[in-house]
Amino acid sequence: MSNQTIVITGASGGLGSIVVPYFLDRGWRVIAVVSEENAKNRPGAHPMLDVQVVDLTDERAVGSLIASLGESYGVIDAALLLAGGFVAGGVSDATGNEIKTMFSINFETAYYVVRPVYKHMMEQGKGRIVLVGARPALDPSAGKTAVAYALSKSLLFELAALLNTDARGKNVVTHVVVPSTIDTPNNRKWMPHADFESWVKPEQLAEIFQLICSDATSPLREPIWKVYNNA
């Protein structure tokens, strides 16, 4: 049993709804962060589950939440940032508003959590932060059809590099997991004729996330995990 504490954002989403019970089943205390009150009961009741509602685009509210969690639980061992969104479109389609929207959804929602969590982990001397990158942010041939999304996700790689440089010599590491298409109900609905078997299963990502947050990855310092399956 783990008896460790993890913060998971995007907990009620297609991926989060699989990841949250996965960690609970392995003895983690899970602080599941959702953005709307009506999503508060989606993870289901569990003695090791604490569901918190907060607008992740509100830096002050997020900072207050992380501070209160630090006081309540003492140690935050890991933070898994699953919240985000997607919009397709090349340069001709990616208006300034779309760039700003994707920046807010994919970068700000991560940064506002990461900043206070990172400070907390540095003070306690250990911790794991997991960001979810995107293949289009690494591969221009994929990114050219989702420019706003790719640009916003590319900042997460820069953020991880900056944090890992700052934390050099400490047991605080930021990982970036880069999945190809995730096999969720929404993705199947949007791409009904795709080869679902080539996609990455949420359960596979949950297993990788749990591995990252375990002591098995303690020697790693600048990790990027490309989880593409056969897509």
Image: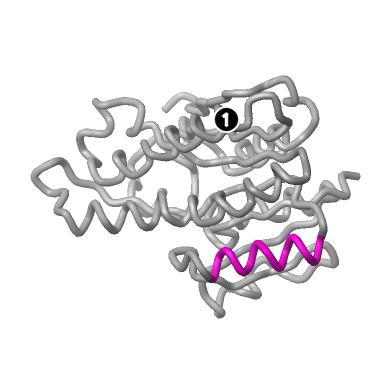
Q: Check the picture and name the quadrant holding the N terminus.
A: top right
Tell me, what colour scheme is on the image? one colour
Question: In the orientation shown, which residue stands out farthest toward the top?
Answer: 219
Residue 77: image x %, image y %?
76, 46
Q: Check the picture and name the quadrant holding the C terminus.
A: top left
User: Is residue 46 rendered to the left or right of residue 1?
Assistant: left
The structure residue drawn at horizontal position 69% and vertical position 37%, both measured from the top left corner, is 207
The structure residue drawn at horizontal position 57% and vertical position 32%, both measured from the top left corner, is 166
Q: Magenta region: which residues?
A: 61-73
Is residue 198 located in the magenta-colored stretch of the structure? no
User: Is residue 73 rendered to the left or right of residue 41?
Assistant: right
Q: Closer to the camera, 92 or 151?
A: 151
The structure residue drawn at horizontal position 72% and vertical position 25%, both measured from the top left corner, is 217
Q: Secondary structure at mark 1?
A: helix
Residue 98: image x %, image y %?
22, 55
* Type of amino acid at the residue the image marks with label 1: Asn
Tell me which secondary structure the magenta stretch mostly adopts: helix
Residue 222 sits above or below residue 176 on the image: above
In the picture of the structure, the residue carrying the numbered disc 1 is: 164
Residue 4: image x %, image y %?
83, 48
Residue 31: image x %, image y %?
71, 61
User: Is residue 219 rendered to the left or right of residue 39?
Assistant: right
Is residue 62 located in the magenta-colored stretch of the structure? yes
Residue 23 sits above or below residue 144 on the image: below
The structure residue drawn at horizontal position 33% and vertical position 33%, both measured from the top left corner, is 136
When asked about the image quadrant of residue 48, the answer is bottom right
